[in-house]
Image (tube, rainbow, N blue to C red):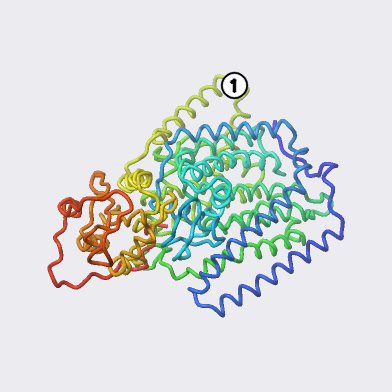
Amino acid sequence: METGTQDTLPPHAAHPRRPSRAFWYALCLAAFGATMFWAQRIVTNHTPAEQRSLMAVATVWGMHGCLVVGLAALAGLAVPLARLLGRKHLLIGAGLAVLAFFACDLAPRTNRIFYDEHIYMQIGQTIAHTGRAEYANYARVEYGDMTVYDAWVNKQPNGHPYLFSWLYRLFGVSEAVSFAAVHVITALTVAALYFALVLAPWTLPAGTPVAAALAFAFTPLVLWWSRTCAVEPTAAATGVATIFAVCVHARWRDPATGEGSPWSAALLAAAAAFACYFRPESMLVYPVAASLLWAADRRFLEDRVTWAALALSSALVTPNLVHLWSVHTEDWGAKDGNRFGVGFLMKNLESNAGYFVQQKWFPLAGTVLALAGVGWLLARNRRLALGAVLWFALAWGIFVLFYAGGYYYGASSRYAVISAAPMALLMGIGAAAAYGALRRWPPALGAVAVVLALNWAAAMHFVPTLGRESNEARADIAFAQEAAAKLPMGALVISTDPCIWNVLGRNSGQLFNVEGIVRNQLRELVRQYPGGIYLHWDYWVNTEPDHARVWHQLVLDTHATVYMRYNAEAVQLALFRLDTPYALAAMGGTAQPEGPVFKVDDTAAEALVDRPAEPAGAPAPAPLPASRQGPTVP
């Protein structure tokens, strides 16, 4: 037995009247024309630096537009959608989301991308407080408020921080809120995938929606990354949301003419545009949506309502496109500037294709089920097969051409999360088809089910682990968390990654922002920050000699004291207090401590930095350049 939706609308899903279509066309064309004119003016009349500054606001407003259009469309469709799904499917979807939520707890909560996850959080913090999508190089964060003194525009899209910013407005800025957000979004993605397939206008094997949702929920890397603050789980979620909108729009068409509804078209336009704000390659969602609509009804190629939706979606995504253009000269960590090329193909293919057969991060059982799903589609619905395979091919294949796209490359296994949903669709179809073929032979069905379940369970071995990858950077985050809890109010922490301290509610800045005032007006800086001036001897100082040289010299020049220290395998982490009596006397005044008086211990400081002092008369080192912007891997 097979299930699927009929190629007709339910009686309650009435189409809007003709005047609403006229308004729809006018709205879409006006939005498209206005944003194209705006984008042309921005690109031609402003330098890249000016463009980036303008995009700090424009991208936020672009996402506001996506949210308003999407929620308005969803509100217009909510009642008929609920009736169409019915209580049974709504309860099953909710149950799958709850199951996925608790399944994610199999993985430990931790950071795995250093220090990008805190960069995302900190940009979300800045959006929440200033409305600008910027990373704060130097900011005062006290008593729940934030003042940004110096900032730069991040090269990655701002969708992930934007989601955080709304939660920060409601619950305050914290790592706990950020982790919970990704956790919950992963669970909701499972429900969205289920609802999409229930509404899908194609005939599928019975049980496909449940099987696909479970396959996604228990994909090992989905579980592993759902307990981080990485962007990939939310990028996958917005991709699934777009597919949900595709299914709604395909379902809400006029069966006689094939014309879509403006309500569902608006939902699709907003979902597709919003997805693009999460990762650069998320823009490939447009050809996927087009192929699936064509698979549902060829008449969508001539549907003016759908073409108008594309115009509106283009308008909504334009700020993100201009943002990406403004940073197109960035090397994204590729030292030679070669970010994409066929030269990376073979090595990345060995890793990324091997992902499906090596039983390291993905069960071989899943690969077998996905191939079965492809076979079923080729035999029953080749147009849908093309759309489903295209979704997988683009979501998975784009990374094999990227210099850091191989899953072997650092924490790049997270890229597999992007292709987890289309893979789950194929696995779900394969599993449902296999069940339908074998259910009349219970012994064979039971044997196959046991073999597949055991193989799947074996591939889950790494899910409960932290992993050795970036363990020293992880220790740096733990050290900062402990130190932030002990620092007095009004303290300033100088760090290569002020995002960590800002998210933890502490004032922080890059050395290049404050080194001049430390060396020449330290008394004034202490007046502004009576809790003390601290230097974070962090992971980067341990691993990059240029940073270590500058940090070391400042520790020596101020006769800094050790406030806290921690050994983490091959690195030493510490907080030095710079506003010592010696430094205040030599660099801008006399000591006027407003808290505990720290005994000057040059020996302890020297032992920690483990570097000889510069000889007398040596030229002062140059301050840390402003180009230091976090880790090199995007």
Residue 490, percent from left and from top = 39, 54
Q: Residues within 10 Å of mark 1 (few under 14, many from 20)?
A: few
From the viewer's perspective, is 182 left or right of 338?
right
Residue underneath mark 1: 441
Residue 529 quadrant? bottom left
Q: Amino acid at mark 1?
A: Trp
Relative vertical location of residue 352 with respect to residue 557 in this rendering, above or below:
above
Residue 183, percent from left and from top = 52, 40
Q: Residue at x 85, y 42 (%)?
A: 11
From the viewer's perspective, is 76 left or right of 286?
right
Relative vertical location of residue 26 with respect to residue 349 in this rendering, above or below:
below
Viewer-nearest residue: 508 or 17: 508
Q: Secondary structure at mark 1?
A: loop
Viewer-nearest residue: 85 or 485: 485
Relative vertical location of residue 200 with respect to residue 346 in this rendering, above or below:
above
Q: Residue at x 29, y 70 (%)?
A: 520
From the viewer's perspective, is 338 left or right of 259?
left
Quarter occupied by the N terminus: top right
From the viewer's perspective, is 374 left or right of 558?
right
Quarter occupied by the C terminus: bottom left
Residue 398, percent from left and from top = 49, 56
